[in-house]
Amino acid sequence: MRDMFTKKAIKIFNQATADFKKTGSIDQALTNRYSLTEEYIESLLYKKSWIDTIQWAYEDIIRDPNIDPVEALNLKRKIDLSNQDRTDTVELLDEYFLKKYSHIKVLESATINTESPAWALDRLSILELKIYHMNIEAGRLDATEIHKNNCSLKLSVLIQQRDDLSTAIDELLNEISDGYKYMKTYKQMKMYNDEELNPILRKNKQ
C-alpha cells in the first residue's frame, strides 16, 4: 500500500492547533515542534496550521460589533501579515514538492492539475480547523439540543469533505510520482503588500 501523505499532514495540523490552544493567547510566538533543517516538510506543515489557527482567532475577534476601531485596525494589520505569511508558507510547500518530484520522467500524456499539492493542503489545513471548532460546538454544554444536532450534522459533512479531499490529494501526489501528472509553481504575485506595486504604499514611500 502506498504512503498516504495526508494522514501525516492531518496529524501535524492537529498537533499545531492543540499546541496553540494550550494558552489561547493570540500574541504567542510560534514554537515549532519540528526542526526546519532535519524535518523540513513537517516543520512547514506545522507552521501552516499554526498560522491558520491564529488567523481563525483573529477573524473571530474582528467580528465583534463592539470592537474598538483602533483595535480593529491593528488587528486588520495582523490579518494582512498573517495572510502573507500563509501564502509564503504554501509556496515553500510547493517548492518542496517540485524538488521532490524533479527526477520523475513525465509521460507525454501527462496533464497538469487545477491546483498544486500545496494549495490543496492549504484547504485541508483550514478544513481541519473547521472540524475542530464544529466538534466543540456539537458538544457545547451550554448550547441547545437543536444547536448541537445542527452542528453534529455539519460535522459529518466536514468529515466527509476531509476524507474526499485527502483522497484527492494522495491520488494527485501518486499520479505526480508516477508521471501521469506534472506540477508547476506559480507565485501569487500579491500586489497590495508591495511598495512598488500598490499605488498607496508607493505614494507614502516618496
Image (spheres, rainbow, N blue to C red):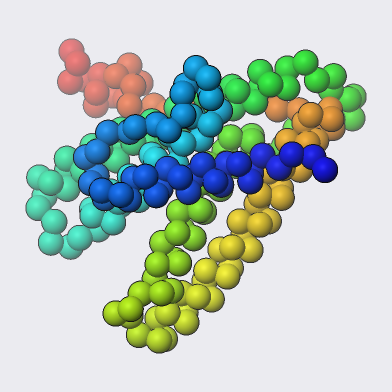
Could you tell whether 112 is left or right of 133 in the image?
right
Q: Report which quarter residue 97 is drawn in.
A: top right
Location of the C terminus (image quadrant): top left
Residue positioned most to the right:
108
Residue positioned most to the top:
206
Could you tell whether 56 is left or right of 91 in the image?
left
Where residue 143 sits: x, y (%)? 33, 80
Location of the N terminus (image quadrant): top right
Look at the picture and state if 35 lies above or below 86. above
Residue beneath the point at 88% across and 25% down: 107
Q: Report which quarter residue 111 is drawn in.
A: top right
Using the image as rendered, state which of residue 48 and residue 191 is in the foreground: 48
Residue beneath the point at 61% across and 56% down: 162
Look at the picture and state if 15 lies above or below 46. below
Residue beneath the point at 12% across and 46% down: 71
Where residue 153 sits: x, y (%)? 54, 76
**Residue 13 appears in view:** yes
Q: Report which quarter residue 196 is drawn in.
A: top left
Could you tell whether 125 is left or right of 115 in the image?
left
Query: How many numbered circles are shown?
Result: 0
Using the image as rendered, state which of residue 160 and residue 84 is in the foreground: 160
**Residue 189 appears in view:** no
Where residue 20 sits: x, y (%)? 34, 45
Where residue 154 sits: x, y (%)? 52, 71
